[in-house]
Amino acid sequence: MSADVRAAGAVLWRRAGAGIEVALVHRPRYDDWSLPKGKVDPGETIAATAVREIAEETGFRAVLGRYVAQTRYEVPAKNNGRLLRKSVDYFSGEAVSGAFAPNEEVDELRWLDPIAAEQLLTRPADVRVLREFCALPPAPTTVLLVRHAKAGKREDWTGDDDLRPLSEAGQRQAAALRDLLPLFGPDRVFSAPRLRCVQTVGGVADALGVEVRHEPLLSEEGYWPDPLLGIRRLLAIAADGGTPLISSQGGVIPDLVSALADRDGLELPAARDGVVPSKKGSLWVLSFCPGDDGPVLAGADYYPSPLPAPVPTAG
């Protein structure tokens, strides 16, 4: 059932010694302690809403990580008092800069360890979100795996298929990705060598001031002769830490994500009847935790479109 009101927020966290602290906000209008959140503006993705609302309520700039949870509840409408259905999508969000100042919505912010935060939260739904957040380490390596944007039909292109560029629709998707992907803090960019893959993430690379590094093993023709080599290459990229962005193809991404999930025992709720989705312009946010033999896939969130209002399916 769709919601009448959509909102987004995050479990905002920072490092504190050997552990972490999370931020809770006090809203004088409701006299409650909650996780920072707010309503989605028209033309805004839920990821953009989460980052904007965190900045407005807390003064901190957040870099998003994995998708944590969704809460649903009813709220009264302002004019007629009827009940509206509201959904709130929460991410993990690391505070990377900023400082709190009291504002119209929030008069106090507290940084607390997760146990103390759970005890202070007013609503049980927020406690559930915090527990979901704590189920995984808050700072795993995040790999942003994008399928190239739309490039028109293969049969309508008479040149070398490696040079088939993005279509007008694909350029719009790439522009939307330039807005969406920086919210997750990519720090380096990789791509299958085909032009349409490079063009999809080229704007992000330009903004970062980095080169797009070609990865032949993550192209269709490079992956399928020996998929294990492609999987090892992605794991090697993940093992370097940070937040790498990788642009690949629809003939690679489903097998790659499925193989990693099977290997590490992770269920993929986004898959239907065993089929792992990978629409053009879509994004997988893959969360890896350190393991004895290298990175272990601990979470996989799928965004079917970079355009406004995609709701991820968390894994």
Image (tube, rainbow, N blue to C red):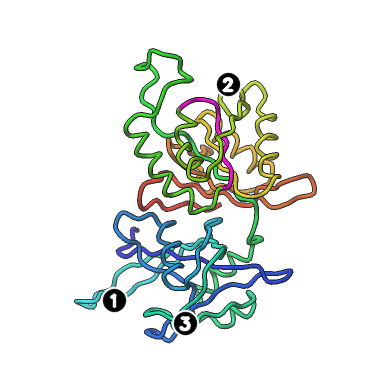
- Quickly name the residue at label 3: 26
- Quickly name the residue at label 1: 76
Q: Residues within 10 Å of mark 3 (few under 14, many from 20)?
A: many
Instruction: Say which amino acid is labelled 2.
Output: Glu
The mark nearer the N terminus, 2 or 3, is 3
Residue in view at x 64 percent, y 37 percent? 259
Of discs 1 and 3, which sits in the foreground?
3
**Circles 2 and 3 in contact, beta carbons < 8 Å:** no
State how far apart marks 1 and 3 are (Cα).
Answer: 21 Å
Q: Residues within 10 Å of mark 2 (few under 14, many from 20)?
A: few
Q: Is residue 105 left or right of residue 138?
A: left
Residue that lies at the very extreme toward the front in this rendered image: 209
> For the magenta stretch, what is the residue range?
187-195
Q: Position of residue 40 (x, y in %)?
A: 35, 62
- Quickly name the residue at label 2: 221
State how far apart marks 1 and 2 are (Cα).
Answer: 55 Å
- 218, 177: nearer the viewer: 177
